[in-house]
């Protein structure tokens, strides 16, 4: 198992400019890609409220289990008590009643992240736990996945839990170590796709000033990592984090491609892989997840227009050797 990133820091430094302008007069709160609960039809509102409540119960179960080192059977009993299986089945239907040809891009983005995010990986991880197919760190990983999805749900639909959302908006520094501890050597599985995440962090400062901003950063990372895991040719995904100048941190997510995957990308996009972040059909999806990443990054810097965001290197994608490499930047946060 590789324990270090295959692409050097020097190579990753050349992906984009090392000096990026910040056009905002105040720190990005992370609250731009959200909708109200009443934007969903009744059936979808009920699903959201039920899943959010069940995830809260699940978080308590996993917190107790990881601290007590409880094994699989107790987890299975607890999942039955909180009716976790019903929550998963209802989430598979979520959004179908609300989405129409006239749905707003904002609403489509929220539905995408609520159905995706960390929820699918959490569902698969819990299946493995109940079957006894448990790696030493998977109980802790399930806890992180449940916690993150609750935060991302509040980020996307603030009035789902308004009191907790207001607490998420309070000033609170978040160090990059919070990302390193949950992703380093984590086994991440989506349906039949599985990969180990190899983290190389050369920055140890703050990346967020509020929980709500950190949830926005998580929405970017989960979209990029979900994409990388689905296409990883060798069951490894790499996350490298480093500071490019006094004010900016670069996050790089990449995976090895097969020759066939590389040929498909070259045929469809040529050298303009950055256009993947503009949305539209990609190599197996709608491209909405990548567009969400670009919109968050543009908002974090106050850049008007996704094309400008791509052209100036705030976010992008490139083939490097036989790796598909994506990157984005985030402003360094105050202590």
Image: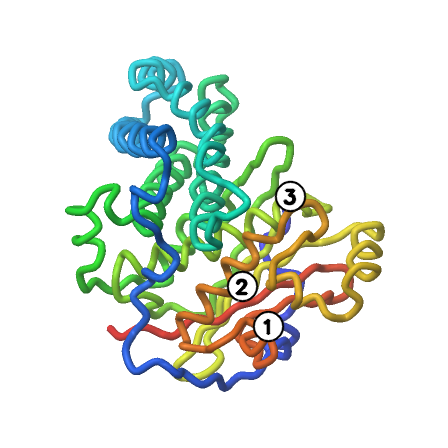
User: What residue is shown at x 46% (from left), y 22% (from top)?
Assistant: 89
Question: Which residue in the structure is indicated by mark 1?
Answer: 9
User: What residue is shown at x 54% (from left), y 52% (from top)?
Assistant: 289
Question: Which residue in the structure is indicated by mark 3?
Answer: 230
Q: Nearer the viewer, residue 34 or 78?
A: 34
Compared to 197, does 55 lie above or below? above
Question: Which residue in the structure is indicated by mark 2?
Answer: 240
Instruction: Give the quarter of the figure containing the C terminus.
Output: bottom left
Q: Are marks 2 and 3 in contact (CB under 8 Å)?
A: no
For the residues labelled 2 and 1, the Cα–Cα distance comes to 8 Å
Compared to 252, does 225 lie above or below? above
Secondary structure under the numbered disc 3 in the rendered image: helix
Q: How many marks?
A: 3
Compared to 320, does 126 lie above or below? above
User: What residue is shown at x 79% (from left), y 59% (from top)?
Assistant: 268
| Left or right: where 298 falls relative to 190 | left
Secondary structure under the numbered disc 2 in the rendered image: strand
């Amino acid at each position: 198992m590789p324990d270090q990133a295959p692409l050097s820091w020097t190579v990753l430094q050349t992906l984009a400019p090392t000096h990026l302008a910040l056009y905002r007069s105040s720190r990005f709160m992370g609250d731009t890609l959200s909708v109200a609960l009443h934007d969903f039809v009744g059936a979808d509102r009920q699903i959201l409220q039920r899943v959010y409540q069940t995830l809260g119960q699940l978080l308590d179960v996993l917190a107790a289990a990881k601290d007590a080192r409880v094994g699989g059977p107790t987890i299975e009993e607890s999942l039955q008590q909180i009716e976790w299986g019903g929550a998963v089945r209802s989430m598979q239907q979520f959004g179908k009643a609300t989405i129409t040809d006239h749905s707003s891009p904002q609403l489509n983005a929220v539905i995408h992240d609520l159905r995706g995010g960390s929820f699918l990986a959490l569902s698969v991880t819990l299946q493995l736990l109940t079957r006894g197919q448990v790696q030493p760190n998977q109980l802790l990983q399930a806890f992180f996945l449940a916690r993150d999805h609750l935060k991302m749900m509040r980020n996307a639909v603030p009035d789902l839990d308004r009191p907790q959302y207001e607490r998420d908006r309070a000033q609170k520094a978040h160090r990059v170590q919070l990302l390193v501890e949950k992703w380093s050597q984590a086994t991440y599985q989506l349906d039949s796709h599985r990969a180990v995440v190899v983290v190389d962090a050369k920055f140890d400062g703050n990346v967020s000033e509020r929980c709500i901003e950190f949830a926005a950063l998580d929405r970017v990372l989960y979209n990029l990592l979900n994409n990388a895991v689905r296409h990883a040719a060798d069951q490894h995904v790499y996350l490298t984090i480093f500071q490019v100048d006094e004010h900016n941190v670069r996050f790089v997510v990449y995976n090895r491609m097969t020759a066939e995957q590389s040929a498909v990308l070259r045929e469809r996009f040529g050298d303009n892989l950055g256009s993947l972040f503009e949305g539209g059909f990609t190599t197996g999806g709608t491209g909405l997840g990548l567009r969400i990443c670009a919109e968050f990054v543009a908002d974090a810097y106050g850049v008007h227009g996704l094309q400008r965001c791509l052209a100036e290197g705030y976010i992008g994608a490139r083939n490097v050797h036989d790796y598909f490499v994506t990157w984005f930047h985030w402003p360094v946060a105050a202590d």
